[in-house]
Each structure stands twice: as C-alpha cells, then as structure tokens.
Image: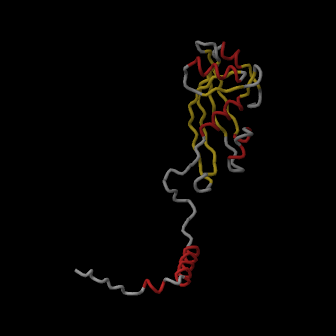
Amino acid sequence: RPQEAFPYRDLARQKARISRQIGVDELTRLRPLIEVGNATELTATMAFNINRNGFVTVAGDITGSFRLICNGCAESLDHMLDLNFACIVVDSEEFAARAVDESGEQGDVLVVEGAEMTVADLIEDEILLCLPERLCISQPCEMALETDFPAALDAVAAAQEKAEADNPFSVLAGLDVKTKKPLD
C-alpha cells in the first residue's frame, strides 16, 4: 500500500526501517515517463533517524528496472535503477531553508504537508531527481535518427547554382586577368 501515509517523525524517533515492493504504475508522476504496459516493481528500503539538529532524515536505496524513452534518440530503452539516497524531511519551506543551512549534510530536502508522508511520495521524488536526460551511453547515439538529408543537400546545391547564374558579375570570375608591371 504505497499510498498509505505514515508518521515520519515517530518512525525517526524509533529509528525504524521500512522495506517495500512498489509497482511503478503506482507512482503517478513517474508513470507518464515510463513505456506503457511495462509494469515492474521496485524494491525500496529506508532507514529513519533524527540528525543532531533535530531534523528527520531518511536514507536508503531503490532498485529495479523499467523502460524509458531516451531524449537523445527517442527509443524505448531499459533503465536499471540502483539508487542510494539520503534526504531530510521537513513540513514547511521555512524549515527546508533552515535544514540546508544548519545540517551541513549532503542530500535532498523533502517538504511534506502535515505530519505524515507516503512511501510513494518519497520514492517518486528520489527517482525523479536521479533520472538521466539521455539513456544512450554512446556519443553520438547509434540509434539516433540520421541528420543527413540528401534531398535537402541537393536543394541547397541547386539554389547556390541558381544564385551564381543570376549574379551579373559571374562572368568576371572566368576571366584571366593579367597584371601590369609598374613602370620604373
């Protein structure tokens, strides 16, 4: 039940650990980025704690795979997810700014409304922050569409020929010009 809310402060006080399997189709903001009909499950483990400044921290990892559309070649490719994350959970923008200034810890700040959050929100935020813009490793991508358009090149060459033919000075280009020596 990834949409079930839980009291994150209580979990942090208890130093709780949560391990969940969550379907990618249950992550509403991630769903439009994933290839339709490719329902997979992700495994998430999270450890809650309270840092020295009194902020709730969550550290964990998310593993799994799904198919994404590459922004480089527009092909659907498998994306293996093996994400380690650490974040500070706060309930207002004011505390978010303070958490960054005071904690000195590396990680993201997750602002939630109220005293509860869902597993789906936490997992989805971390995944969206780490998605690559390009899935293709090779540069340039071997699956990218060709950018060489022979018809367009022929049209450019024809336009250049026409421009040269219409140029009244094009006749001068073919003349053999002899230079005179200056008189002594």
Identify the residue shown where x is 44% and y is 85%: 172
Identify the residue shown where x is 58% and y is 63%: 145
> Where residue 104 sits: x, y (%)?
55, 20
Identify the residue shown where x is 43% and y is 83%: 173
Q: Nearer the viewer, residue 49 or 151?
A: 151
- Outermost residue on the left side: it is 184
The quadrant of the image that shows the C terminus is bottom left
Number of numbered discs overlaid on the protein picture: 0
Position of residue 100 in the picture relative to residue 9 (left or right): left
> Where residue 20 sits: x, y (%)?
67, 30
The quadrant of the image that shows the N terminus is top right
Query: Considering only vertical position in the picture, is 47 above or below 134?
Result: above
> Where residue 58 sits: x, y (%)?
62, 23
Q: Quadrant of residue 158?
A: bottom right
Q: Quadrant of residue 23?
A: top right
Position of residue 5 in the picture relative to residue 78 (left or right): right
Q: Nearer the viewer, residue 135 or 15?
A: 135
Query: Considering only vertical position in the picture, is 25 above or below 4?
Result: below
Q: Nearer the viewer, residue 182 or 107?
A: 182
Identify the residue shown where x is 68% and y is 30%: 122
For the rendered model, the colour scheme is secondary structure
> Where residue 160 sits: x, y (%)?
54, 78
Query: Considering only vertical position in the picture, is 143 above or below 30?
Result: below
Q: Quadrant of residue 95?
A: top right
